[in-house]
Amino acid sequence: MDGTGVIVRARGEGEKRWHYGGGLHTWKATTEETNGAFLFFEDHMQQGKVTPIHIHPDADEMFYVLEGEIIVHLEGGTEHRLQEGGFFLALRGVAHAFMTTTETTLLCIHTPGYAQGFYRHASEPTTDDRIDGPVDFARVEAAANDYGGVKLLGPPPFAAART
């Protein structure tokens, strides 16, 4: 933030963090920079990344797929395939999970930005652009338990993730 209430970040700019659920985050706007209104980041993931079924109790989560493809799973078993230009919104408390079927880049927004503590503690700073780093769901679960923002409800619901 430049002190004027404006954030300008070019492609590749922003705090880079390896998320232990899989994926390279590039934080475009933090909770502090938006006065708590939202957290906004780009998430670049390798094919096959999955998330556990989860909710965000205090924030809405939105995805906009820039490239690649994800399958979004909703509680009850409904699944939606999203490709480039696809949009997904889960209002707070709606159970969901997703899996990448290809290398994928999407934009993610949490509003308000309550989930930032979770993402910060379920990740670590990085200076490279690797998307194939270590996955550690125990660390993700510990961050969820300690910092809130997300509540894990169960394992990834995708059959391919269990084989």
Image (cartoon, rainbow, N blue to C red):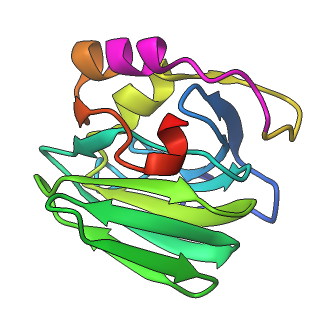
**Image point (89%, 33%), residue name:** 128
Residue 133 on the magenta segment? yes
Can residue 5 be seen at all in this image of the molecule? no
Q: Is residue 132 above or below residue 30?
A: above
Q: Is residue 49 above or below residue 70?
A: above
Percent position of residue 59, x then y? 20, 52
Quarter of the image for residue 12 reads: bottom right
Percent position of residue 106, x then y? 60, 65
Residue 145 on the magenta segment? no
3 left or right, relative to 133: left
26 left or right, relative to 54: right
Percent position of residue 27, x then y? 60, 47
Can residue 25 be seen at all in this image of the molecule? yes
Percent position of residue 26, x then y? 67, 47
Q: Which residues are magenta?
A: 132-143
| Residue closest to the eye, 145 or 52 | 52
In which quadrant of the rendered image does the C terminus lie?
top right
| Residue closest to the eye, 134 or 16 | 134
**Image point (66%, 32%), residue name:** 17
